[in-house]
Image (tube, rainbow, N blue to C red):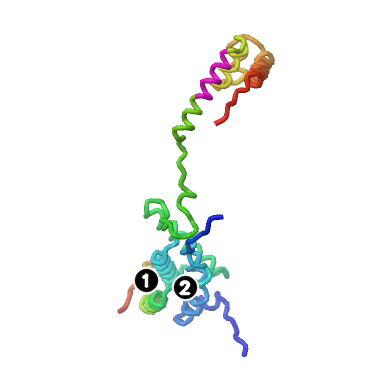
Amino acid sequence: MQHEIIPDAALVTNYITGDESALEILITRHKQKIYSFIYSKVYDRDITEDIFQDTFIKVIRTLKRGAYNEEGKFLPWVMRISHNLVIDHFRKNSRMPKFDNTGEFSIFSVLSDSSLNAEKQIIKDQVESDVRRLVDELPEDQKEVLLMRIYNDMSFKEISDKTGVSINTALGRMRYALINLRKIIDKHNIVLTN
Amino acid sequence: MAKLYTHNSIKKLNDLKPKEETVNFLLNYSKALSVINCNKMTFETVLN
């Protein structure tokens, strides 16, 4: 026995001309794909059911109004509608998806506390004060360029204008400042990591 | 290595289907809905 599969486009045309059973075939054919697609976004059976229903209500109304132009893309069109409804759902629900933390997915994999803990904060303060002391050890001209570049975020053009030296000199001073800092750090075995 | 005692609550996406009543509702809605176009206006009526 051979089943002839009626293409979506033909079913849509039949449906528009009043064949209600065509819709049943279309829904049966695509329900699993569309339902899974929605579920993969919202992870909730009831909400998926609602969005699935709203999707097809839109489909039915559009088809009945004759506002659908067939381009052989019934399924992508329905998927787009459901996608838009999923977005609407998340917008309504304070722009946040809900997760029940019972599966393999852990909510803590998307939430993180970016603030430093007490220990790391102390280390950070320590490192910063070490760096300040190291910078203070530099010769005045190098220190001046380094502070302007790193702390004041000035360009070498601005630094050269302000200090009255050429850009190349400013660059050279910056280079020596960094070399000297590294030398001091190596010499005293200072650890500057958090 | 620590054993995992959790079950994956997220069902396999392949065996997900809408409820029978949802599909029936849609089919009935489709049968009940009639759209009448009249002079650039569209009327939608849902019959009982």
Disc number placed over residue B38 in the picture, else none = 1
Q: Where is residue B19 in the image (x, y as percent from the top left)?
A: 41, 74
Q: Mark 2 lies on which chain?
A: B
Q: Position of residue B48 (x, y in %)?
A: 30, 79
User: Which amino acid lies under the numbered mark 2 shown in the image of this protein?
Assistant: Lys
The answer to whether marks 2 and 1 sit on the same chain is yes
Would residue A133 be counted in the magenta stretch?
A: yes
Would residue B4 be counted in the magenta stretch?
A: no
Q: Mark 2 points at which residue?
A: B17
x 32%, y 78%: residue: B47
Q: Are marks 2 and 1 in contact (CB under 8 Å)?
A: no
Highlighted range, magenta? A126-136
Q: Distance between the residues labelled 2 and 1?
A: 38 Å
Is residue A128 visible in the rendered image? The answer is yes
Pick whichever, A122 or A106, lies toward us.
A122
Q: What element carries label 2?
A: loop
Secondary structure character of the magenta stretch overall: helix
x 60%, y 21%: residue: A155
Give the quadrant of the C terminus of chain A. top right
In this rendering, the answer to whether B10 lies above or below B34 is above
Pick whichever, A189 or A170, lies toward us.
A189
Tally the marks: 2
